[in-house]
Image (tube, rainbow, N blue to C red):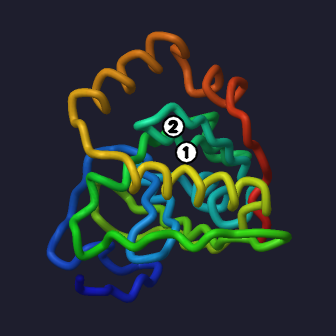
Amino acid sequence: MALYKYEVGTLYHPGKTSFQEAGEYNYRSGAHELRLFWASPSAREVHAVQNGQIEVALLVGPPVLWFLYRIDGGCDWSDAPYTWHLLPPDQRMPPEPLTGEARMLLNVVLVDATTGLIRALRAATLSPAVSQALHAAIAEQMAAPWDAAAYDRARTATYARYPTSADMARAARWRGVAGA
């Protein structure tokens, strides 16, 4: 996998100048990343991503891991479904088991979806409880056989049960505030 150096004001991906608006969580190549593709983010939204409180929550409903996030001043609760099985094989790395007060780093990247330019970068730590739960859920996904139809059914059922991301966050077993 080619690694890119992320810098504010540069393209998120060389040669790509537009993205579909979305928020995506990924654990790939041993790193946790929250990628926010927002169309023409305002100065207030950029500031919020750089400095606002980030709340996270995990809703685990195998085979889907729901990474939920809310950024004070930037966005209300949003969801990002994740499964390790959809990663390219060269990016799949087993998460290390965590104990005690170990915290994982979450890299947050805000990309202007209309230009492809990085508008904000931030690194924040996840609480020990969220870090442990996240790694355990990913390890559980890795150990299970891949079934694309089951994944699609689980996503559909979760959206039917929890119509909004805020509903999912309220139902989440693990919640925390990402630290700087």
Residue at the location (21% across, 28% down)? 149
Q: Position of residue 12 (x, y in %)?
A: 32, 73
Mark 2: amino acid:
Asp
Give the vertical position of 1 relative to 39 (above or below).
below
Q: Is residue 40 visible?
A: no
Residue at the location (66% across, 52% down)? 133
Q: Which mark is residue 126?
A: none
Q: In this view of the protein, which residue sits in the foreground, 88 or 122?
A: 88
Query: Is residue 119 shown left or right of residue 76?
Result: left
Q: Position of residue 79 (x, y in %)?
A: 51, 37
Label 2–label 1 contact, CB within 8 A:
yes
Say which label, 2 or 1, has the lower sequence index. 1
Q: Is residue 62 visible?
A: yes
Q: In this view of the protein, which residue sits in the foreground, 129 or 144?
A: 144
The C terminus, quarter of image: bottom right
Return the residue at label 1.
Answer: 67
Q: What residue occupies the far right of the structure in this picture?
A: 101
Instruction: Work out how far the residue at label 2 is from the one at label 1, CA to CA, in angstroms.
Output: 6 Å
Residue at the location (22% across, 57% down)? 18
SS category of the residue bearing label 1: strand
The N terminus, quarter of image: bottom left
Query: Is residue 73 shown left or right of residue 145?
Result: right
Q: What residue occupies the far left of the structure in this picture?
A: 15
* Picture quadrant where residue 105 is located: bottom right
Mark 1: amino acid:
Phe
Q: Which mark is residue 79?
A: 2
How crowded is the residue under tag 2: few (<14 C-alpha within 10 Å), some, or many (20+)? many
How crowded is the residue under tag 1: few (<14 C-alpha within 10 Å), some, or many (20+)? many
Q: Position of residue 81 (x, y in %)?
A: 43, 40
